[in-house]
């Protein structure tokens, strides 16, 4: 009867996981994740490591779709001690963080590989940068369409809908697909602008 209960319970877990879009490949005990395994979230973020009583427990790594990862020791589903590594290999440090501060604005790949020649500066950590679809922004984990307020992964998969705060931040700070002339009226020639400024009465 214990085996029958375990099999029935396992089938129910699989149905539930299919319903929420997650999957699990690994050891189970009484129908719950137990031992070594791999849990994949609907966002394609993967946890690979130790489980106990259906939770992340022990050593495990979260692998994010953009190539970054978080290695940690987990206790009953909560990360207790860990390290975050960006997709380019830069490891986050809580103290003495020297990357991208007020004194050194180089990208991590520039710190590792040196600066590019004058006139060929990098505009992102990735060189060459990703091509951004028309009318969209590159917000770091995907492309943002301000018309639909949707962020899609670089692979085209839906990530999230942006709230007002995220929308404003992306529009204000992220790289966009188009160029804008700032500080001058492009339709006016330099001569016309000069003529206007010379007609100012003092």
Image: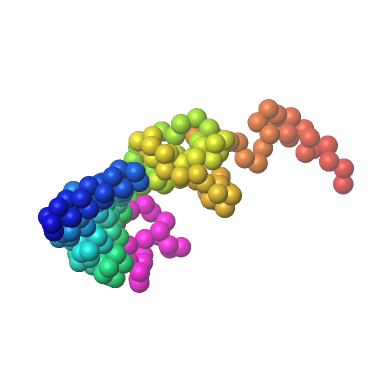
Residue at the image position 24 percent from the left and 60 percent from the top: 54
Image coords of residue 33 (percent x, y): 20, 57
Left or right, residue 202 beside residue 112: right
Left or right, residue 69 beside residue 165: left
Residue at the image position 35 percent from the left and 46 percent from the top: 20
Can residue 104 be seen at all in this image of the molecule? yes
Left or right, residue 76 beside residue 141: left
Furthest-right residue in this view: 201
Image coords of residue 85 (percent x, y): 28, 57
Furthest-front residue in this view: 1
* Display coloring: rainbow
Image coords of residue 192 (percent x, y): 74, 29
Q: Nearer the viewer, residue 26 or 168?
A: 26
- Residue range (magenta): 88-108
Residue at the image position 25 percent from the left and 46 percent from the top: 14
Residue at the image position 60 percent from the left and 36 percent from the top: 181
Left or right, residue 180 beside residue 133: right
Q: Is 98 a magenta residue? A: yes
Q: Nearer the viewer, residue 101 or 53?
A: 53
Image coords of residue 84 (percent x, y): 30, 60
Q: Quadrant of the N terminus?
A: bottom left
Look at the picture and state if 44 lies above or below 80.
above
Q: How many marks?
A: 0
Tell me the chief SS of the magenta region. loop
Q: Is 147 a magenta residue? A: no
Can residue 88 be seen at all in this image of the molecule? no
Q: Nearer the viewer, residue 195 or 6?
A: 6
Place residue 179 in its image quadrant: top right
């Amino acid at each position: 009867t214990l085996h029958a209960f375990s099999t029935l319970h396992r089938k129910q877990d699989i149905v539930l996981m299919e319903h929420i879009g997650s999957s699990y490949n690994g050891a189970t005990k009484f129908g719950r994740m137990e031992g070594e395994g791999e849990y994949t979230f609907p966002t394609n973020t993967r946890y690979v490591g130790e489980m106990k009583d259906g939770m992340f427990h022990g050593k495990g790594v979260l692998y994010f779709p953009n190539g970054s990862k978080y290695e940690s020791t987990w206790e009953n589903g909560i990360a207790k001690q860990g390290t975050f590594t960006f997709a380019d290999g830069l490891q986050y440090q809580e103290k003495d963080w020297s990357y991208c501060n007020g004194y050194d604005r180089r990208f991590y790949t520039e710190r590792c590989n040196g600066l590019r020649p004058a006139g060929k500066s990098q505009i992102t950590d990735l060189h060459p940068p990703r091509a951004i679809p028309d009318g969209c922004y590159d917000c770091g984990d995907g492309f943002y369409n301000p018309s639909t307020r949707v962020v899609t992964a670089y692979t085209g998969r839906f990530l999230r809908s942006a709230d007002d705060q995220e929308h404003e931040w992306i529009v204000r700070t992220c790289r966009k697909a188009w160029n804008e002339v700032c500080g001058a009226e492009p339709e006016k020639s330099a001569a016309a602008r000069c003529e206007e400024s010379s007609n100012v009465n003092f």
